[in-house]
Image (cartoon, rainbow, N blue to C red):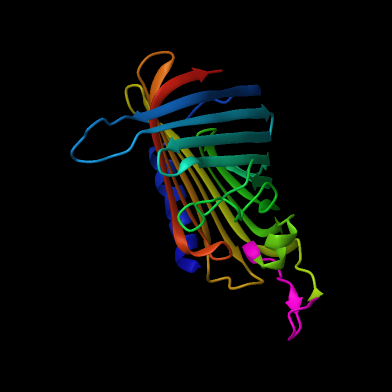
Amino acid sequence: MRKLLLTIVLTIFITSIYAQEEAPKDGWKKGGTFSLLFNQSSFSNWVAGGENALAGNALVNYNANLLKGDWTWDNKIILAYGMANTESKGSIKTDDRFELNSLAGKKATKNWYYSMFANFMTQFTDGYDYANNPDQLHPISKMFAPAYLSFGPGMLWKKSDDLKINISPATGKITFVLDDTLANAGAFGVDKAVYDNSGAMLEKGKHIAIGLGLNIGAYYKTPIMKNVTMENILNLYSNYLDHPENIDVNHQLNVVMQVNKYISANLGLHTLYDDNMVQKTQFKEVFGVGFNYTF
């Protein structure tokens, strides 16, 4: 934990040296992007092998930030959904996210603010283990199963809307599993059902798990070359009440390569580690070329 905090402090120090100063102006600053990406492959008598496939991904990434005197209020919504159709597996889901972030701060010193944050995450549709359950009969996740609500006070270091780190040492985290089957199985860290020796259920699984811990959230967005923008979103969480040494990691890297006003190539990398989900690192990559609209 001490090494983690040292890394955060060093990051703040280094970025404070090299980041450019911006003259903030009071009022709302709103904007976002809508992306619709496509991937397609087709084969006919192709000796090397392959199968026909068609995939599409939709993404909304929107920000609404308010500055008023000593107060700052940053809001972000991320909506994503993707499907692919292949000859062997049929229709499968490739992306599914619903995420809301809100961060309010009252200035304490030049770049430091007393803060309060809230984050909510879930998904839109049922998720399946396509490798082990090709018939898609038994969902391993659903909307609000799981869903996560995190909130807490802390301190915000903010250089600009594109560079900020929030440290919340007393973060409450509520995990919702609003599905009886998944709750009874103890999915996503809730208490599972209790059975007697004959297999009869004595107590149903819990639908809610409550945690208290340290949350660190960081955001950095920058152009890396002409018409290419990189966005990093990092969230770290340690639950004081349940194995605090196991740090949950949620990192999103989004790179947008703008071809012209409406066409872009987008790369999204999403890395997750949460031992209440699965005791392995989860990794997802989405890349495609398609329609991109800025609003």
Tell whether position 192 is magenta.
yes
| Residue furthest right as drawn | 202
Asked whether residue 26 is in view, the answer is: no
Q: Residue at x 70, y 71 (%)?
A: 192
Taking the spot 40% from the left edge, 43% from the top edge, the residue there is 88
Give the image location of residue 273, x and y in percent: 49, 59
Furthest residue to the bottom?
197
Residue 182 in the magenta stretch? The answer is no
For the magenta stretch, what is the residue range?
Answer: 187-201
How many numbered discs, if any?
0
Judged left or right of residue 35, residue 203 is: right
Q: Would residue 24 be visible to someone looking at this image? A: yes
Q: Is residue 183 left or right of residue 219?
A: right
Direction from residue 187 to residue 257 in the image, left or right: left
Where residue 142 sits in the image (x, y, percent)?
65, 49
Q: Residue at x 38, y 38 (%)?
A: 18
Query: Considering only vertical position in the picture, is 107 above or below 265?
Result: below
Give the x, y percent position of residue 5. Answer: 50, 61
Which residue lies at the image location 61% right of the left edge and 53% below the top edge?
139
- Give whichever of 124, 29 is nearer the camera: 124
